[in-house]
Image (tube, rainbow, N blue to C red):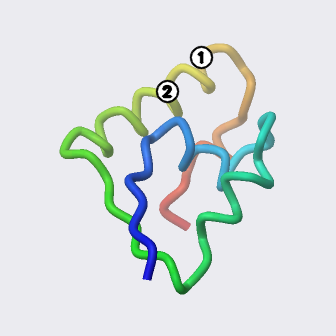
Amino acid sequence: MKTYVVDACVAIKWFVPEIHKEAARRLRNPSYQLHVPNLFLVEFGNIVSKKLRRKEINLEVGNLEK
């Protein structure tokens, strides 16, 4: 089993259309073990907040709890 550390800038590509989205999605392979840094949730929230402020995504996309 391969192990990867996934940063927030990669994980955001799983939810919003961005360049290299398909490469990021390949990491979601069930045979991979994924780990995240300690500040992952803070960094991920910061990316979502910035994208909302810049109107790159709307509230529906920004509400990732669904």
What amino acid type should be assigned to the residue bearing mark 1?
Arg
Q: Are marks 2 and 1 in contact (CB under 8 Å)?
A: yes
Mark 1 highlights which residue? Answer: 53
Q: CA distance from mark 2 to mark 1?
A: 6 Å
Disc 2 residue type?
Answer: Ser
View extreme (front): residue: 1
For the point 61% across and 26% down, which residue is it?
52
Residue 5: x and y, percent?
38, 53
Label 2 element class? helix
Image quadrant where residue 8 sits: top left
The N terminus - image quarter = bottom left
Picture layout, residue 31 above or below residue 43: below
Q: Nearer the viewer, residue 54 or 26?
A: 26
Q: Is residue 47 above or below residue 27?
A: above
For label 1, the SS is helix
Q: Position of residue 54 (x, y in %)?
A: 67, 14
**Disc 2 marks which residue?**
49
